Image (cartoon, rainbow, N blue to C red):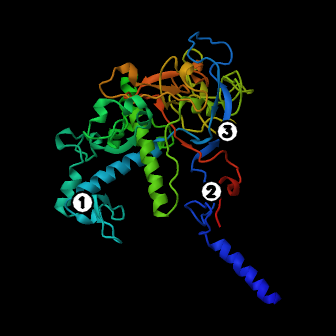
Amino acid sequence: MKKVLVISLITLFLVSCGNSNTGELVGTRKNSKLFYQPDPYGMVFVPMGSYTMGVGGEDRASGYLAPAKTISVASFFMDETEITNNEYREFVYWVRDSLIRQAIGEVNPEFLISENPKTGEQYDPPYINWDVKIDWDTDDQTVRDAIASYYIPEGERYWGRKEIDARKLNYVYYWIDLHAAAHKDFRDDADYRNASFANRPQGMTDRSVYVHNETINVYPDTLAWIHDYAYTLNDPLTELYFWHVAYDNYPVVGVNWNQARAFCAWRTEKLNRYMHSKKGFALSEYRLPTEFEWEWAARGGHTLNPYPWGGPYTRNEKGCLAANFKPLRGNYIADGGLTTVVVGHYPANDWGLYDMAGNVAEWTLSAYDPLSYNFTWDMNPNYTYNAEADDDPIMKRKVIRGGSWKDIAYYTQVSTRSYEYQDSAKCYIGFRCVRPYLGRNKGDDPSKSSRVYR
């Protein structure tokens, strides 16, 4: 009888553990594994926190553009350095190869995947087959012609060199305007409500209204070195800075705000395609930091500090300058560099972030408004405006932070705000990406933050 009782209890226990049809609420994911969010390569974790943004002491410029205000920011990952030439070239080369593969695919179908090999589902448009290598010296004349269509025309070549025409390197990506979708007045607007379906219920808008696609030329404006400084001999930087191996680990410049946002979209898609191939979870998107996230990250956990290194001075205890900027009355080389320098050359702040002051100023996600500190919320604040091509230039202003190699020390302070137009590319502006952290804070026990059903 004891053996029968023990076997019965064990059987009952196993049945109760394996059977979810008990009338209880158990959710849709059964027997799911714990979710551990890996640290993204080349990024550091910035914890959530509350801080007083803006000018902590005297507003020397008397601009009243950054009044002190206490806010709270969610945790996120941030690139430890600005995006380098070498990293941005991966994006440019991917766009180049994808366009050429599509062109070759019109005459050689093996460069495109037209159907799902398992289900037979037809892909429209076909996917690019990245497993087939491009033979740049092929004897197939039709393939050679397809590749040649992306070269600079013969009449424009310098010394007859065959070079990819940068004007054709256009990247197409999609994004959803969630702010417009959430705005009730926008949803009820008659022009949008009647855009597609005349009999749509009151207040309901066709989803396609909020789905946008952008076509962005991704090649940096290498001429920025000359048109930003017309009476300076910057020809060598114009000719070599972006592609020469000597500048691989220098921050990319000549990239406007639109191109930086396109890079973030491509980086997100690249990661999620890999996660999908491994049957993993999609992760949060890469994007530009808001100016409030940027300031929180630049402060490195300090309070009311004027510079990322925490101190009130631009020199350390040994008298060495702590960043790459324009010291004194134009002694550019006093800090060790004439223009840009290799990323990570100066010490990181207390969160492991390099060059949050100087080297190149950095694009943020935020639109610029002198009064945005006054009307934004105190939790994850941000002000955005998606400017159209024909909008007034004042609507195209985006916040830049951190100062650059050509700026005086004031612009390298963590609270100093400046702006540039989203379609302008400068030889002193670069960018870095952030990725929101999924959850409360790093270090949480996954068994508590990610529930497991047995």
Percent x, y of residue 289: 53, 35
For the residues bearing labels 3 and 1, Cβ distance under 8 angstroms: no
Percent x, y of residue 352: 65, 40
Residues at marks 3 and 1, CA–CA distance in whole angstroms: 47 Å
Badge 2 density bin: few <14, some 14–19, many ≥20, Cα 10 Å: few
Residue at screen point 26% across, 41% down:
197
Name the N-terminal-most of marks 3 and 2.
2
Three-letter amino acid code at disc 2? Tyr
Q: Secondary structure at mark 2?
A: loop
Q: In the figure, residue 156 lies in which quadrant?
A: top left
Q: Which mark is residue 105?
A: 1
Residue to which mark 3 is pinned: 351
Q: Between 361 and 59, which is closer to the camera in this rendering?
A: 59
For the residues bearing labels 2 and 1, Cβ distance under 8 angstroms: no
Three-letter amino acid code at disc 1? Gly
- Where 39 sits versus 356, above or below? below
Residues at marks 2 and 1, CA–CA distance in whole angstroms: 39 Å
Percent x, y of residue 43: 58, 45
Q: Between 77 and 228, which is closer to the camera in this rendering?
A: 77
Q: In the figure, residue 121 lies in which quadrant?
A: bottom left
Q: Which mark is residue 36?
A: 2
Residues at marks 3 and 2, CA–CA distance in whole angstroms: 21 Å
Percent x, y of residue 297: 62, 34
Badge 3 density bin: few <14, some 14–19, many ≥20, Cα 10 Å: some
| Numbered label tally | 3
Q: Secondary structure at mark 3?
A: loop
- Where 366 sits versus 177, above or below? above
Q: Between 351 and 393, which is closer to the camera in this rendering?
A: 393
Q: Between 355 and 371, which is closer to the camera in this rendering?
A: 371
Quarter of the picture containing the N terminus is bottom right
- Where 316 sits versus 431, above or below? above
Is residue 254 visible in this depiction of the protein?
no
